[in-house]
């Protein structure tokens, strides 16, 4: 008997001995008087065992049938031996069994079955450093965490890919895309995709990578008076989006945990569809993984409403999300950028343009523009002329085999020079040294 059942037995004995009334015993046990009366009848008929649960020692009526247990364990064993589920945990395996085979069981039930079959082993919990949890933002669109993760998502079947992810802090709504390089252009394209799909968020939270901030320029630098921002930082400022720098991975823990989940789930999904290139991986990511993520892990914000803002009328999104550099216009109305020469068309040439410090712009589609005062001027690439190499004749080397006549003439010239020198200084008086 349990301690709770012994306490009940003690109260029933007091009631039976008429030390207390049935009403007092019911109040002490927290039961009704009618239930105390029934317990007394059962106790007299069956003894102390009447106070225990009626199903004690018997299988539960809600127990999963043994055939379902054997089928689930065998399916897990077969796929694990076929290296399809060799890295599947009980959580993901339970979801796959429910979706593909119609076996609806909880993850803890499957975990217990796998432990009994020795197909799963308990892992010791790691002691993590405790930190204070930050409360979620109240509204959708107030804060977006933005980061890039490098991982072998294709497991050697194709090229190396990077996953750029943006997750809303209030709702955990995910937006992501695979790219070949973690570059400024790739992150600007991801920002454009997010703005076109959701709007401008109030703020973004990123790490302190060089994509989002640059080293301060010296005071004597010719561009030092200008505000020193990276390309993404300038684009965020022009969109009036606040940039928040995270000083540690836990500071942007929501996107870090999303990447950890993707490392466990997305990699296995790409393995099932045999993705081996960028297009196939992005197709699975957009059509399968992200809808499943948003359906399962998205939550309702604390405050209803959308904090995203629409683009102001007349905003040139191509110009804002571009690469810009400062250059000086040469006297022939050309500028140099990336090892090439670009010229201004004749109809766009204006007074004061030569020698001016201008902003050059390379948009994501590859077109080049120049910001001159309050207008944008298209640039045209100049075809550089091939460098002409002029071969100069080499001077003949002096040979040691000179003719006797040349040596005689050289000796005679030397003697004549000495004679002229002595005649020139003959009129000077001799002075003792």
Image: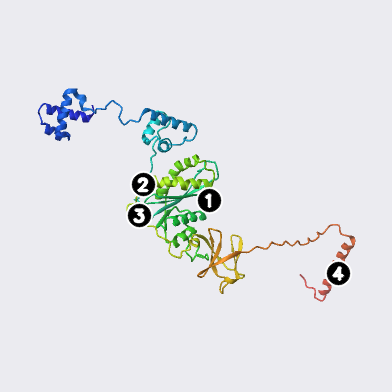
Q: CA distance from mark 3 to mark 4?
A: 105 Å
The mark that comes first in sequence, 2 or 4, is: 2
Residue 139 shows which numbered tag?
3
Please state, as top left, top right, bottom left or bottom right, where the C terminus lies in the image: bottom right
The mark that comes first in sequence, 2 or 1, is: 2
Residue 374 shows which numbered tag?
none
Foreground tag (1 vs 3): 3
Q: Position of residue 21 (x, y in %)?
A: 10, 31
Residue 131 shows which numbered tag?
2
The mark that comes first in sequence, 3 or 4, is: 3
Q: Along the horizontal axis of the image, is 223 left or right of 14?
A: right
Q: Residue 118 or 295: which is nearer the viewer?
A: 295
The mark that comes first in sequence, 2 or 3, is: 2
Cβ–Cβ under 8 Å for marks 4 and 1:
no
Q: CA distance from mark 2 to mark 3?
A: 24 Å
Q: Residue at x 47, y 40 (%)?
A: 268
Q: Residue 194 or 428: which is nearer the viewer?
A: 194
Cβ–Cβ under 8 Å for marks 1 and 3:
no
- According to the picture, the residue beneath numbered tag 1 turns out to be 181
The mark that comes first in sequence, 1 or 3, is: 3
Residue 416 shows which numbered tag?
4
């Amino acid at each position: 008997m349990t301690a709770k059942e012994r306490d009940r037995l003690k109260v029933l004995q007091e009631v039976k001995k008429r030390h207390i009334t049935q009403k007092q015993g019911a109040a002490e046990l927290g039961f009704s008087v009618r239930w105390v009366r029934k317990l007394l009848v059962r106790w007299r008929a069956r003894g102390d065992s009447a106070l225990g649960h009626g199903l004690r020692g018997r299988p539960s009526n809600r127990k999963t049938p043994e055939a379902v247990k054997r089928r689930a364990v065998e399916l897990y064993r077969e796929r694990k031996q076929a290296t399809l589920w060799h890295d599947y945990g009980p959580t993901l395996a339970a979801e796959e069994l429910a979706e593909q085979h119609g076996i609806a069981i909880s993850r803890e039930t499957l975990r217990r079955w796998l432990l009994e079959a020795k197909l799963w082993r308990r892992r010791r919990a790691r002691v993590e450093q405790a930190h204070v949890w930050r409360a979620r933002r109240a509204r959708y669109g107030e804060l977006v965490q933005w980061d890039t993760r490098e991982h072998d998502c294709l497991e050697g079947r194709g090229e190396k890919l990077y996953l750029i992810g943006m997750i809303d802090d209030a709702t955990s709504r995910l937006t992501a895309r695979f790219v070949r390089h973690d570059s400024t252009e790739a992150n600007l394209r991801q920002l454009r995709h997010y703005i076109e799909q959701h709007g401008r968020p109030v703020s973004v939270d990123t790490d302190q990578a060089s994509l989002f901030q640059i080293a301060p320029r010296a005071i004597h630098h010719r561009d030092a008076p200008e505000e020193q921002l990276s390309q993404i930082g300038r684009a965020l400022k022009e969109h009036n989006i606040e940039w928040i720098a995270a000083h540690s991975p836990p500071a942007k823990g929501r996107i870090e945990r999303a990447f950890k989940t993707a490392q466990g789930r997305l990699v296995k999904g790409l393995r099932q569809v045999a993705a081996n290139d960028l297009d196939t991986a992005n197709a699975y990511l957009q059509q399968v993984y992200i809808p499943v993520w948003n359906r399962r892990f998205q939550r309702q914000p604390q405050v209803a409403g959308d904090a995203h803002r629409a683009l102001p009328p007349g905003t040139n999104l191509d110009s804002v999300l571009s690469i810009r550099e400062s250059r000086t216009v040469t006297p022939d109305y050309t500028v140099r950028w990336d090892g090439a020469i670009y010229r201004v068309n004749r109809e766009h040439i204006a007074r004061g343009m030569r020698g001016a410090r201008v902003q050059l712009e390379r948009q994501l589609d590859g077109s080049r523009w120049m910001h001159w005062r309050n207008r944008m001027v298209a640039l045209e690439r100049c075809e550089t002329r091939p460098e002409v190499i002029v071969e100069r004749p080499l001077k003949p080397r002096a040979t040691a085999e000179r003719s006797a006549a040349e040596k005689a003439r050289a000796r005679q010239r030397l003697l004549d020079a000495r004679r002229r020198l002595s005649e020139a200084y003959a009129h000077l008086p001799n002075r003792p040294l």
